[in-house]
Image (tube, grey):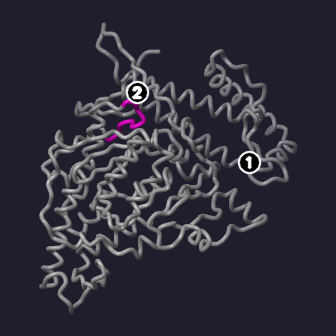
Amino acid sequence: MAFQSGAEFGSNVKAAYAALMAATKAAGRLPSDLSFHRTLDETLDAQLARTSATALRLANALWTPVHTPPARNLASIDDVAMQQPQQADGWTAAPGFSRVVDGIDTLLERIDVGLDEVLRRPAHGQRQQTVASAPVKMADARGVRVVHHGKNVARPQLAFDDAVDNSAAPFAWRIREKPHALVPLEHVAAAGGAAPEGPMGAHLASLGVGYELPHPYAHEIANQPVARQLYEERAALEPLAWDATPFAFVDQPEALARMMEHLQGAGEVAVDLEHHSYRSYQGFTCLVQVSSRTHDFVVDALALRSHLHVLNAVTADPAVVKVLHGAESDVVWLQRDFGVYLVGLFDTYHASHVLNMAHHSLAHLLRTYCGFEADKKHQLADWRIRPLPQEMLDYARSDTHFLLYVYDCMRNELVARGRRLVGRDVGTPGGACFGQLSLGGEQTVVQAAQDGVDAVVRRSRQTALRRYAKEAYDADHGGGANGWAAVLR
């Protein structure tokens, strides 16, 4: 088949979507008692028979060549159709429906690979080389090379110790022990109540709206004393030189234990995650980057997925400030994949808003405070790739290497602003105050306006209180996570 131009290809895609939209809408208008109407109207019965035959022919045209060797033809469209049995609620899939879904997935995979090869087509006369598990690169409109996704990467989910749960059942805690607890874990579970029993409980579970456990660290996040260092204005500590900073790629339990031993003596740690969601129902975390004042770590979250619950020894410690930027997603990914929670979060994204900065991205903060220009070409990288290329490893490491210095600068600006607004030093009694905090046993009145440190702490606590919940999927109407309705819009 001749290669189509971009405009021609785009118009054909739009035409295909329009046809799919029309077919979907037409199917949605079919009455549930169609069989009854067929018995009353011979003309309608004949038209539907012809339509079914056409659908069967098209299904076989798609289905048969997908498999190697080619699969046998479908005998009837009823073998693969969604059906609504009489005297039953909802729809059921015919026995062959899942095979068709798998076949369509195979077609999409072939299209994806084909597009990659077209976009990376070598010059005339050159040989094109394909390396398994190597990143596939595509050029954007400005000629910048952008890592998009890996080719021939084995699915890491298949090697997880815990089976991936894509069911409609409510999310269950992964946490089994609770370091730095004010309220024991079993008390939190008991306070959450019990799931409904009987038919109502079964019905709610089938809809994916059954019982969900509360946030296991909600009380600690809301009530633990704020780390004293947040209210201290002190010289910002510049990060060590890149090449002089000890770095470790952590992919073994022994290396993880050494990292935890180091972090438990830190006053602040910077944390970031690299996540994969391309053609994945819920997605999964691939890397966890952690930096202290003196060390950088990149943790292989695929290899150590079942071990990373130990991070709670640091992440749930209120005495250790956890510095993240834009942690809305990171918070729920840590819960979902590892059972890890953040007590004592300082989100520099919230700080940028409180300080009324012109821009709020991490790239802007790194440029403003560090003079570091973040390399954006790896934003769409496939973080499943192993071994990671050095440039991707450096990109991941850079997200946290400079972040504690950014935190120092922003904290100092917030403290100084609070002092200017109240017209007196922090710690002076009297006047309007945001709240009283217990700092090292000494009751200190912290005078700070709402756009000071307290505002960032409050907003960061709200972020840390986010709770992971599965997004319901509506197969009939295409709603929910990765719903087909979004594709047709």
Residue segment shown in magenta? 379-387
Where residue 225 sits: x, y (%)? 35, 75
Rendered position, 272 above or below 352: above
Does the magenta portion include 382?
yes
> Label 2 is placed on what type of residue?
Glu
The residue at which mark 2 appears reads as 8
Give me the residue at 19% from left, 83% from top. Answer: 427
Q: Which mark is residue 459?
A: none
The residue at which mark 1 appears reads as 91
Rendered position, 23 above or below 263: above
Whether residue 412 can be seen here:
yes
Q: Is residue 176 left or right of residue 288?
A: right
Where residue 169 sits: x, y (%)? 64, 55
Give me the residue at 46% from left, 39% from top. Answer: 303
Q: Are marks 1 and 2 in contact (CB under 8 Å)?
A: no
Residue 41, quarter of the rendered image: top right
Where residue 217 sits: x, y (%)? 47, 67
Helix, strand or loop: magenta stretch:
loop
Whether residue 489 can be seen here:
no
